[in-house]
Amino acid sequence: MLTRRGSLLLAVPILLVLAAYVLYPSARTFASGLTVENYARLFSSWSSANVRALFNSVFISIATVLGGGVLGTALAWCFHRFRFPLRGTLMAVAAFPLALPPLVGVLAFLFLYGESGILPRVLQELFRLDDTPFAFEGLAAVWLVHVYAMYVYFYLFALSALDNVDKSLPEASADLGASGFTTFRRILLPQLRPALTGAALLVFMISMASFTAPLLFAGTESFLTLQIYNYKTNGNLDLSAAVSVLLTAICLVFLLALESRRRQRMRGAAKGVAAPPAPIRSGAGRIAAAAATLPMLAFLLLPIATVLLISFAREGSWTWQIFPTAYTFDNYAALFRDPDVFDPVWNSLRMALVATAGNIVFGVAAALYIAKGNIPGRGLARLLTALPFAIPGTVIAVNLIVAFNEPVLPALNTILVGGFWILPLAYFIRHIPFVVRSTTAALEQFDDRLAEASADLGARFATTFRRIVLPSIAPGIRAGALLTFVASVGEFVSSIMLYVFDNRPISVEILAQLRLYDFGAAAAYSVFLMLLIGLATVAIGKSGPSLAQ
């Protein structure tokens, strides 16, 4: 569809943008951090905080893969195989954690399970205990939050794979007298392996990059992302860069493995007709199914319900009590009545819109070159546009600080650090893969003969693209743009390291209100974010191809 000249005109600016804002900042960080002296200081002994941070990060990531894999795959199998009471309700909410901004999910667990949260106080009152029965902190707390947030990847990958397995194999297994469990273990699980491996690689990488849960729940335990933040906060940018290099290297290995799995994934043709979920008819079976479903619904919905409840709490009304003693709508009214309260909302919306606009323009151009270009360099562009997936938010922040704390050409000879534009740039870099992936998937399904017919009738490329190509790929662009906007509005990890007071976003303000013990205001901001993201998620669900393609 693209001529060599058109491909060249797209390739040059695309590769320049990737070089200036993805490669150059990363290279500056590598040059600053990758020294023998830095690593000798970081890992001076086996008992150092950085060794513990590396161990904790890897250990929690492996544990998250195991916990999320078991939970997500079991849910997918149960929904695929059985029909039971509340099945529809549970399916409707099973993917809900994916739509939660990380900070809001962590805040929900803090309000519900934290040492002064609702559940420990209920148990303390119920059993007449002198102290709360458990302290929700440390590695166990981080692991539980991760499983809650990340099991969804296994659930969605496994559910999609189950819908596409060769239907004739389970039928043959059943005809030969195999039990349902034997069929799952010997027939279905091997066919699910590519999807589960992809989910495991993705979850491990996301868990390694996690910052919010360790920040609020790790206590005295160290994590690599926390070490990056602590070194930067203490002004030791060289050591922050050194830890960033280590974390990026680990995530890069898993990104390359994930990309390899994506290219080699199985493409078998399904046979037969999918059997409908079998109803559970026995009374004992239905009771057992309900007994398993209700705790799962509680696990999924109680944290969100808790945030909603606390959002109506009057400031100072929830200290030692089980529930707030006074409720008010002022927390919501202040969002639109008080300019100081609304500023973080406006900042987040404005910066998210700027970043999304940039991602749309760049993403469509990059996808067009990757999918339809006819000059060398497409593979390099595809790899570089996927690279931000492997760079944790804390590392992107360090990259930008190292690269743009002085006047340089990519920053138009200005200092970006400490200004407004540093955050929209961070959001743009972090979310490059969204529009590129979704638009590339749409373009790969586009029939080039339509564009050729338009050209044969005398239409220019701009007219062909506007009238023929763009309407066909619009669902992919819209899906990527909505994902970019949603992720940017709730972005916390890069924001906490790069913001200044004048451009503080909602996520940073939530943390600020939490530290001021104004739980109602923090929860009201969180509910606003959830509503905004919920609306965008509905729109995403109605938009064409998914990023999984």
Image (cartoon, rainbow, N blue to C red):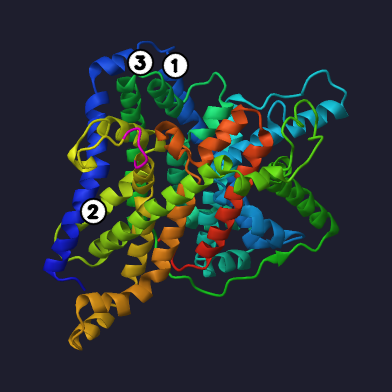
The span from disc 1 to disc 3 (Cα, nearest Å) is 8 Å
Determine the residue positioned at 36% across, 71% down.
Answer: 473
Q: Position of residue 443 (x, y in %)?
A: 32, 69
Give the residues in magenta: 417-421
102 up-or-down from 373: above or below: above
Spatial CA span between label 2 and label 3:
36 Å
Query: Dot 1: what SS?
Result: helix
First in sequence, mark 2 or 3: give its number: 3
Left or right position of 97 against 33: right
**Residue position marked by numbered label 2 in the rendering:** 381
Q: Tell me if label 1 and label 3 are in contact, CB under 8 Å.
A: no
Q: Is residue 333 left or right of residue 291?
A: left
From the viewer's side, name the closer residue of 218 and 457. Answer: 457
Q: In terms of secondary structure, what is the magenta stretch mainly?
A: loop
Q: Residue at x 51, y 36 (%)?
A: 508
Question: At label 3, which amino acid type do we have?
Answer: Phe
Quadrant (top left/top right/bottom left/bottom right) for the N terminus: bottom left
Q: Amino acid at mark 2?
A: Ala
Q: Is residue 105 left or right of residue 439?
A: right
Seen from the viewer's position, the closer of residues 127 and 265 is: 127
Residue 438, picture quadrant: bottom left
Res 373 → quadrant? bottom left
Taking 317 as reference, is 421 above or below it? Answer: below
**x 37%, y 40%: residue:** 420
Residue carrying label 3: 43
**Mark 1 = which residue?**
49
- At horizontal 57% and vertical 68% (from top left) the residue drawn is 172
